């Protein structure tokens, strides 16, 4: 597998280099040189394939021989060992539940696959690998869980102070060992900017072997494509014209779906669903992309004003707006509308959406009004209990908290305060 930079199509690097570098030196994003369609035989066999088996086939199609098949299968079996069920909400809608992993969020798929792959590729290295990751909520917990106690790898998580839920914060600040949390006095965009600047800073990259676990890293996107195939497998015999509705922040999840479509998955349409941070829906509707500072919302993991993976979306469509908008529709909703959707679906359909899934549900219903011959799969990206205070306020009732989250309540938060000025972050990195 060879990869290029979205800023330099002539560049070629190996999978190992792309994963460990995270970002190209030109501040682009790595993309596969070739995205080959899966064979008709794969799709014919898909209904009988297990989730790990189809994941192995999809990964092999992308990665080729960069990782020997027997080693890749071991990585897959360790990483993809929990389900992704499609649960019916109504006759036209299913929820793809992606929260059955260790941190109860969809990012467990990427976090675990990345941890296993990096651990495999890092064998024999004599220098510690330092992973920098910015989080708007769920990435931090998934990465912390995935890399916890991984030999030879240290993880530094930057998160915006006061802008993640209490349980999300506990997930990334209570493990210790090789996991360090930095509480940044700013937004997710500030955290992301600090990480990107560190990657491009020669003084830091000389002192530390750096990599990233954000969705800027191609190793995050590869496994996120797996569950689009898994979802399609579950509904393909009952439904046609399948639409995936993706609650979106940094747009890695949607980009992974576009990779699946490039590999031949017969997706009828994608919906990019956002909260008030609607720069991509605005682009899809007008052709004008104007990133701006993020604003805080109920669906905090989507509070991103300058999504990194938009560069990959543009690359997949050769920066052609007219073609992209044929495959993707964009909708945005405010908090009041999101709260009403949570209540309505809970009382009417007996299904509990988290605030992010509720945004996706609203976008799907809006699209379905004009396209009644379609079936919508809404990505439920995190367990509702991760947003306990808001969920109970919205519903006016208590909800069940899984034991693995309840156990965090008595743990002590350990986080290092950090300003959003890069000089402060640089000085801290140079001192460790």
Image (spheres, rainbow, N blue to C red):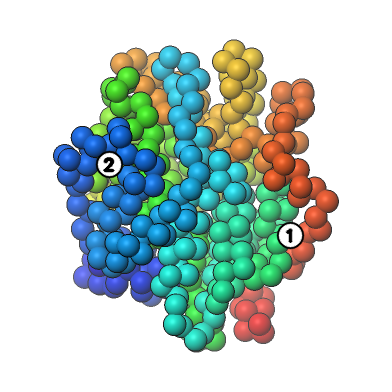
Q: Where is residue 26 in the image (x, y as percent from the top left)?
A: 36, 72
- Between residue 93 and residue 189, name the one nearer to us: 93
Farthest-out residue, left: 40
Residue drawn at 43 percent across, 14 percent down: 91
Q: In this view, does 277 lie above or below 108?
A: above
- Between residue 306 and residue 354, name the one nearer to us: 354
Q: Do the residues labelled 1 and 2 touch (CB within 8 Å)?
A: no
Residue 174: numbered disc:
1
* Left or right of 342, for residue 415: right
Q: Position of residue 158 (x, y in %)?
A: 63, 63
Is disc 2 surrounded by few (<14), some (14 to 19) or many (20+) residues within 10 Å?
A: many
Kindly tell me whether residue 233 is visible in this rendering: yes
Residue 261: numbered disc:
2
Q: Quadrant of the C terminus?
A: bottom right
Q: In this view, does 163 lie above or below 357?
A: below
Image mark count = 2
Q: Where is residue 186 in the image (x, y as percent from the top left)?
A: 66, 58
* Left or right of 284, for residue 166: right
Q: Where is residue 391 in the image (x, y as percent from the top left)?
A: 70, 31
Of circles 1 and 2, the one toward us is: 1
Element marked by disc 2: helix
Residue drawn at 61 percent across, 49 percent down: 103
Quadrant of the image occupied by residue 372: top left
Indicate which disc, 1 or 2, sits on the residue closer to the N terminus: 1
Is disc 1 surrounded by few (<14), some (14 to 19) or many (20+) residues within 10 Å?
A: some
Kindly tell me whether residue 273 is visible in this rendering: no
Quadrant of the image occupied by residue 390: top right
Residue drawn at 60 percent across, 57 percent down: 145
């Amino acid at each position: 597998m060879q990869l290029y930079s979205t800023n330099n199509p002539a560049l070629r690097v190996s999978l190992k280099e792309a994963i460990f570098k995270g970002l190209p030196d030109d501040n682009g994003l790595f993309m596969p040189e070739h995205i080959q369609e899966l064979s008709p035989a794969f799709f014919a066999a898909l209904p009988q394939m297990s989730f790990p088996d189809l994941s192995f086939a999809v990964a092999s199609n992308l990665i080729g021989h960069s990782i020997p098949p027997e080693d890749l299968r071991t990585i897959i079996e360790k990483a993809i060992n929990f389900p992704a069920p499609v649960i019916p909400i109504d006759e036209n809608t299913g929820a793809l539940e992606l929260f059955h992993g260790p941190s109860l969020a969809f990012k467990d798929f990427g976090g675990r696959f990345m941890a296993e792959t990096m651990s495999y590729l890092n064998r024999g290295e004599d220098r510690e690998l330092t992973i920098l990751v910015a989080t708007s909520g769920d990435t931090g917990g998934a990465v912390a869980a995935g890399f916890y106690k991984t030999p030879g790898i240290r993880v530094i998580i930057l998160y915006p102070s006061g802008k993640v839920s209490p349980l999300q914060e506990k997930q990334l600040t209570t493990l210790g060992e090789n996991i360090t949390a930095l509480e940044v006095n700013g937004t997710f965009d500030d955290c992301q900017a600090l990480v990107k600047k560190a990657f491009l800073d020669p003084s830091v990259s000389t002192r530390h072997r750096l990599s990233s676990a954000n969705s800027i890293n191609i190793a995050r996107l590869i496994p996120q494509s797996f569950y689009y195939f898994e979802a399609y497998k579950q509904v393909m015999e009952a439904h046609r014209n399948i639409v995936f509705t993706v609650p979106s922040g940094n747009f890695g999840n949607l980009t992974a779906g576009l990779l699946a479509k490039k590999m031949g998955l017969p997706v009828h349409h994608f919906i990019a669903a956002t909260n008030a941070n609607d720069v991509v829906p605005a682009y899809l509707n007008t052709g004008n992309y104007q990133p701006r500072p993020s604003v805080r919302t109920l669906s905090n993991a989507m509070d991103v004003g300058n999504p990194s993976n938009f560069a990959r979306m543009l690359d997949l469509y050769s920066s052609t707006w007219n073609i992209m908008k044929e495959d993707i529709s964009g909708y945005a909703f405010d908090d009041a509308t999101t709260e009403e959707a949570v209540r309505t679906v809970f009382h009417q359909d007996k299904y509990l959406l988290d605030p992010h899934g509720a945004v996706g549900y609203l976008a799907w219903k809006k699209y379905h009004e004009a396209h009644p011959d379609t079936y919508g799969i809404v990505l439920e990206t995190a367990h509702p209990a991760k947003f306990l205070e808001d969920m109970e306020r919205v519903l006016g009732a208590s909800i069940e908290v899984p034991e693995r989250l309840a156990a965090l309540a008595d743990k002590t938060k350990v986080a290092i305060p950090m300003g959003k000025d890069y000089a402060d972050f640089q000085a801290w990195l140079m001192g460790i």
